[in-house]
Image (spheres, rainbow, N blue to C red):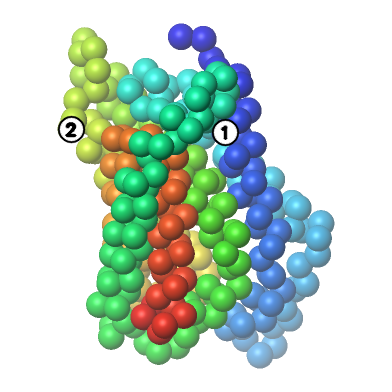
Amino acid sequence: MRFNLRLFVVLLLAGLTGVVSLWLIDLNGLLSVLPTPPEAEIPTVTPALKILSMIQPSFLLAAAVFVGVALAHRVGLSSPVAEAVANGGDVLSALRPQILPGIVGGVVGGIAIVLIASAWKPFLPLEVSRLISDFGNFIPLPVRLLYGGITEELLLRWGLMTLLVWLGWRLLQKGQAVPSSAVFVGAIVVSSVVFAIGHLPIAFFLFPDASLALILFVIVGNSSFGLVAGYLYLKKGLESAMLAHALAHVVMLTASRFGAYF
C-alpha cells in the first residue's frame, strides 16, 4: 500500500496545534512555585527557549504520525476523520459514529482518574497535593485539550500502539492474515503503561524524593485512562480516543474546581 502523504500532513498539522499550544504555559510562573533551595537562582524562560522546547516534541510527533500512516491500515486501525479530510471523503459520516463513544469514554475515564486520586490522597503528603494543584493551575485549558487530546493521542495511540500491534503481529503471529485479539490487548496495555511512565519525569522533577505512593498514583491514574483510549482507538477510530482524552481533562478540571481533584 502506497504511503498516504496527504494523511501524514493532515495528522501532523493537527498534532502541531498541540505543540504550539505549549506556548501558553507560563513557565516563569510555574518555576516560581516549584520548591528550590534558598540559594538557587530561578532561571528566566525567554521566548527563544520556549521555541527551542517545542523542537523535540515536534520531531517525536512527526515520527509517530509517520509510523501510524505507514502501519495503521495494515493492522486494521484507522483515523476516519483525518482519512476523510485527506482523501476527500464525507467528514461528518466519519465523525458521527465516534462522538458518543468518545463522550462516554471521556466521562468514564475522567471520573475514574478523579476517583483514583481521591483514594490516593490520604497516602500523599499535603505538600505533594498542594504542589500538584499549583502545577495544574499553570496548564491552560487549550493545552489540555490540544496537546493532551490531539498530540498525545497521536504519539501514544496512532504511533506507539499501532507499532506495538504491528510488531506483535509480525513477530508472534507469522503467517496469520490479521493480528489476534491478544496482540491488540497487549498493545493497549503496554501503550497505556508507557503513557503513564511518560508522566514520571514531571513527578520526579517536582518531587526528587518521590514516594512509592506518588509513583504508583502517577502510573495507575494515567494508565487507567490509556486503557479507555486504546479501546476506543481500536473499536471506533483515533478521533474517538482524542475526544475522550480532551473530555477527560474537562472532567478533571471541573472536579478540581469543586475540590474533588488536585
| Amino acid identity at mark 2 | Ala
Asked if residue 63 is positioned above or below residue 54 in the image, the reply reads: above
Query: What residue is shown at x 76% (from left), y 53% (from top)?
Result: 51
Q: Position of residue 77 (x, y in %)?
A: 36, 27
| Amino acid identity at mark 1 | Leu
Residue 114, picture quadrant: bottom left
Q: Which mark is residue 182?
A: 2
Q: Is residue 59 left or right of residue 239?
A: right
Q: Which mark is residue 155?
A: none
Q: Position of residue 248 (x, y in %)?
A: 40, 60
Q: Which residue is mark 1?
A: 11
Alpha-carbon distance for marks 1 and 2?
28 Å
Are the residues tagged 1 and 2 within 8 Å (C-beta)?
no
Query: What residue is shown at x 56% (from left), y 27% (from top)?
Result: 85
Residue 177, picture quadrant: top left
Nearer to me, 88 or 52: 88
Q: Position of residue 130 (x, y in %)?
A: 47, 85
Q: Is residue 7 visible?
A: no
Q: Secondary structure at mark 1?
A: helix
Q: Is residue 119 left or right of residue 130?
A: left
Residue 34, picture quadrant: bottom right
* Image quadrant containing the C terminus: bottom left
Q: Is residue 37 left or right of residue 106?
A: right
Q: Earlier in the sequence, mark 1 or mark 2?
A: 1
Local packing at callout 2 (Cα closer than 10 Å; few below 14, some 14-19, many 20+) is few
Asked if residue 201 is positioned above or below residue 187 in the image, the reply reads: below
- In the rendered picture of this protein, how many numbered marks are placed on residues? 2
Q: Secondary structure at mark 2?
A: helix
Q: Is residue 7 left or right of residue 256?
A: right
Nearer to me, 67 or 80: 80
